[in-house]
Structures are given as structure tokens and as C-alpha cells.
Image: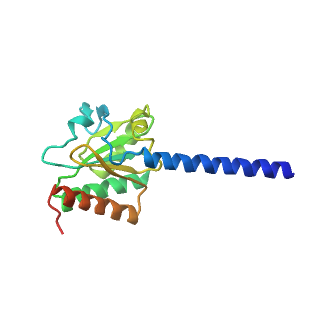
Amino acid sequence: MKRHIVTRNFCMIGLLLIVTLWCESSAKNGLVGARVPDFSGTDLSSIVKTPFTLSSYVPGPDSQPVAICFSGSWCDLCIHELVFLDSLSASVYAGKLRIVIVCIDRKWGFKQQKFYAKARLAYPIVHDSSGLISLKFQRPPKLPFVVLVQPTGVVYTTVSGYSDRAKQFIRQSLERMASERKLFPIKR
């Protein structure tokens, strides 16, 4: 009995150590402050499928920041976050926030089309069925996952999850990015 408890405690300590080291390494080797990883795929946002490459979006014309949103069709919070970002772009940032959606579903079909059509968004949707795009972004820890990119192509910050706190953080990050770089008008 004692042997099982000791073994379990060592396993728990080992697991805790691994998680701690992973968190520290992802913070040290994270995306923030680095050039955004480029990726390409097919834009599935319309009936006509067109090639998409992030490098054609970043750096954006007219000093436009980009929000890369990782989402899945099973994630209702993802739609809420996409609608929130769309409303921020339209009402607060005069349409100057560009949005790219990365769908991490394994398959693309009617369910996924219906999911994204529900939000009525006019942004590129790139399907990451192989998981290769997610790997470039250190596998999003929790959906929705947003990467805010400066117009220069440098990652400004990342946000995981969706809550009032996450919305406030995104808004404040965009405001800081705008004021630091004098990028786009902020409507109050």
C-alpha cells in the first residue's frame, strides 16, 4: 500500500515538474516578440477556394494589425470570440484589424461551413487538418486561441480562452499596440 502511494507521489511530482518546465520554456521560447510563423493553405470562406498565404497578409497594407484565431467547429466560444473581434474591427478600429481564422477540425464539410456561416464573417478561413499550422504556433493550449500580430509581422501577444477578462485583454492589447505604433484610429 505504501509503495503505491510513494509511486503515485513520485509520478505526480514528475508530472508537475514536466508541466512547469514546459510552461517556462514556452514562455521563454514563446511567440511574443518573434516574427509570426508563415503558413499557407486554402481559403475556404467562399464557394471558390483560393490559395492563402499569411505572408500576403502580414505585413498588412496601411499598417494593419492581424488577429490569427484558432478555432474548431465544436467550440461555441470560438464563434463568440470571432464575432467579438469582428465587432472590434468594425466599430472601434475602423475596419483596420485584419482577421484570419484557422480551423483545426480534422475534416472540412457541411458542419464546419455551417458553423462559420453562423457568424457571418468575411475573413479567410484556413483549414489545418494536418495540424502543421498549429505546430508552428506551439499547439494552441486552449480554444479559442488568438495571436495578435503587429503590422510589422512581429507577434504582439497571444490570448487563450474566451471570457470577459480575455476580451478586455484583447481590447487593451490592441489599444496599446495602436498607441505605441500610432497605427489606426481608436473610436471611443
Asked if residue 186 shows in the view, the reply is yes
Query: What colour-coding does the image apply?
Result: rainbow
**Which residue is at the front of the view, 140 or 59?**
59
Q: Quadrant of the C terminus?
A: bottom left
Q: Residue furthest bottom?
A: 188
Would residue 171 appear left or right of 108 to someone viewing this image?
Answer: left
Q: Residue furthest left?
A: 62
Question: Where in the figure is residue 15, as x and y percent of width and height?
Answer: 64, 47
Question: Where in the figure is residue 39, as x and y percent of width and height?
Answer: 32, 33
Asked if residue 74 shows in the view, the reply is no
For image coordinates 24% across by 35% down, the residue present is 55
Q: Is residue 134 above or below residue 24?
A: above
Asked where in the image residue 90 lies, by quadrant, the reply is bottom left
Asked where in the image residue 81 lies, by quadrant, the reply is bottom left
Would residue 27 appear left or right of 51 to someone viewing this image?
Answer: right
For image coordinates 45% across by 35% down, the residue present is 106
Asked where in the image residue 88 lies, by quadrant, the reply is bottom left
Would residue 99 appear left or right of 105 to someone viewing this image?
Answer: left
Question: Where in the figure is residue 124, as x and y percent of width and height?
Answer: 26, 41
Q: Is residue 160 above or below residue 110?
A: below
